[in-house]
Image (tube, helix red, strand yellow):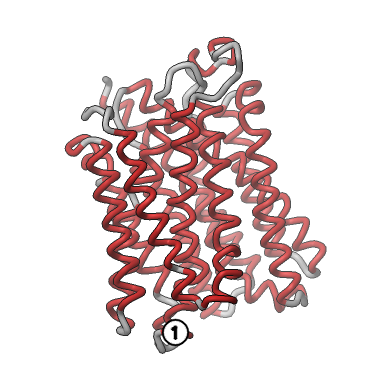
């Protein structure tokens, strides 16, 4: 392995992993301002967010064919540029219809970026025989935190969403320009002709997607319901409840920076099992504790436990013979987004009838399912 070449390629890919997190962080953090700017009501905002998720799913269905035809590097360059322009369009909107068009374009671009960045990450692991997916997903989480913090700062300074988006994405574009020239061409194994003639999916890839869906569902419960749980059930103040996702995200970023080393030292099965049980313990603390500080600690513990899971699932799915990196990435991404999109609303329906604490018991069950699913990774070798 040429270490210098590997380091440059890994940094370039990580730069593109920052892109969707940064765009999503900016957009969601400025949603209150966009609501006022466009005159949209709560129902319209909910519909727009649903369009954002559904358009991402549509793009995920088309992504593997696009990558097979044009290559993941070209798709990533085009889609990431479209994503930045789409977020700027959203932030410039003056009506719900304009914001809806921007959300549709944002969702489509984000779906294509998601699959192509994971395809690039898988190819780096294949080409250089070194694990890096946890580091890549740390870059994604870092982008989300940075985008959210920029939105909070811009709101405090009274800057419009459009100025916020242009400043943040404009600075990012300089790094993107450097990184775009260093993306990898797809390996021969990624060509459609080398895949199984039957076109059937290996069951292990589907398993990786289902487990990734459960992990994303648990993450979605934190983002959508964590602050509400602290505010309405635990009696915390609004400013304290707002720290839930920050506590979860910061431990996620930090632990993902070391996830590849832990995986090499521990192996896949012990890392998945311990991470799932750690997430279970964190959620258990949240549900049983009446202290806001302990609840925040529980969510931070949950972030640490879940942090290595999704990158590992993408990595293992991409290592399965007989399927291209692009198709494996598309399958896992599609199932993952399904959990992130549909699980939080499902919790809402359960919470309406049983209460939010009882609804969140389902998250504990998801963590136990992840722990049980880790037994299928006992063949994972240390590297």
Residue nearest the viewer, comparing 141 with 57:
57
Question: Quarter of the image containing the N terminus?
Answer: top left
Q: Quadrant of the C terminus?
A: top left
In the image, taking residue 245 as reference, residue 327 lies left or right, namely right
- The residue where tag 1 is placed is 233
What's the residue at 63%, 70% (across, down)? Answer: 31
Q: Position of residue 178 (x, y in %)?
A: 47, 37
Q: Where is residue 79 drawn, in percent x and y?
A: 63, 40
* Residue 88 in view, yes or no: yes
In the picture as drawn, the residue positioned furthest to the left comes out as 265
The residue located at (67%, 40%) in the rendering is: 59
Dot 1: element:
helix
Q: Which residue appears farthest toward the front when viewing the image?
A: 354
Mark 1, residues whose alpha carbon is within 10 Å: few (<14), some, or many (≥20)? some
Depth order, front residue of 70/3 = 70
Count how many numbered circles sit on residues in the image: 1
Horizontal relation, residue 11 to residue 342: left or right: left
Q: Nearer the viewer, residue 68 or 323?
A: 323
Instruction: Measuring from the top left, give residue 239's x and y in whole percent.
Output: 43, 84
Residue nearer the viewer, 183 or 108: 108
Can see residue 182? no
> Looking at the image, is 347 positioned above or below residue 198?
below
Residue drawn 52% across the image and 61% down it: 25
Q: Is residue 87 above or below residue 356?
A: above
Q: Quadrant of residue 45?
A: bottom right
**Residue 349's x, y, as percent?**
61, 69
Quarter-of-image position of residue 128: top left
Q: Is residue 344 above or below residue 275?
A: below
Identify the residue shown where x is 47% and y is 30%. 205
């Amino acid at each position: 392995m040429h270490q210098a070449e590997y380091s440059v390629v890994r940094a370039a890919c990580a730069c593109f992993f920052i892109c969707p997190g940064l765009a999503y962080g900016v957009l969601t953090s400025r949603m209150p301002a966009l609501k006022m700017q466009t005159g949209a009501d709560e129902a319209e905002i909910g519909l727009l967010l649903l369009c954002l998720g559904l358009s991402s799913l549509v793009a995920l269905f088309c992504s593997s064919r696009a990558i097979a035809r044009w290559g993941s590097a070209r798709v990533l360059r085009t889609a990431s540029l479209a994503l930045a322009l789409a977020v700027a369009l959203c932030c410039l909107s003056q009506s719900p219809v304009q914001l809806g068009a921007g959300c549709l374009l944002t969702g489509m671009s984000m779906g294509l970026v998601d699959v192509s960045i994971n395809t690039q990450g898988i190819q780096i692991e294949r080409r250089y025989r070194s694990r890096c997916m946890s580091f890549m997903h740390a870059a994604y989480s870092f982008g989300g935190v940075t985008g959210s913090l920029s939105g909070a700062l811009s709101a405090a300074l009274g800057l419009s969403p459009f100025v916020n988006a242009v400043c943040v994405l404009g600075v990012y574009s300089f790094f993107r320009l450097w990184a775009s020239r260093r993306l990898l061409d797809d390996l021969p194994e990624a060509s459609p002709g080398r895949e199984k003639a039957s076109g059937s999916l290996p069951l292990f890839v589907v398993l990786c997607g289902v487990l990734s869906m459960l992990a994303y569902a648990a993450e979605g419960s934190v983002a959508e319901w964590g602050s509400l749980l602290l505010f309405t059930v635990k009696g915390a103040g609004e400013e304290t409840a707002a720290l839930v996702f920050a506590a979860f995200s910061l431990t996620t970023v930090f632990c993902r920076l070391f996830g590849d080393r832990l995986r090499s030292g521990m192996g896949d099965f012990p890392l998945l099992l311990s991470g799932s049980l750690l997430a279970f313990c964190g959620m258990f603390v949240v549900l049983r504790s009446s202290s806001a500080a302990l609840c925040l600690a529980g969510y931070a513990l949950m972030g640490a436990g879940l942090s290595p899971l999704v990158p590992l699932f993408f990595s293992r799915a991409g290592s399965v013979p007989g399927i291209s990196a692009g198709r494996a990435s598309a399958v896992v991404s599609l199932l993952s987004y399904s959990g992130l999109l549909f699980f939080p609303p499902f919790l809402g329906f359960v919470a309406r009838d049983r209460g939010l604490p009882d609804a969140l018991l389902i998250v504990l069950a998801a963590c136990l399912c992840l722990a049980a699913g880790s037994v299928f990774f006992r063949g994972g070798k240390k590297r």
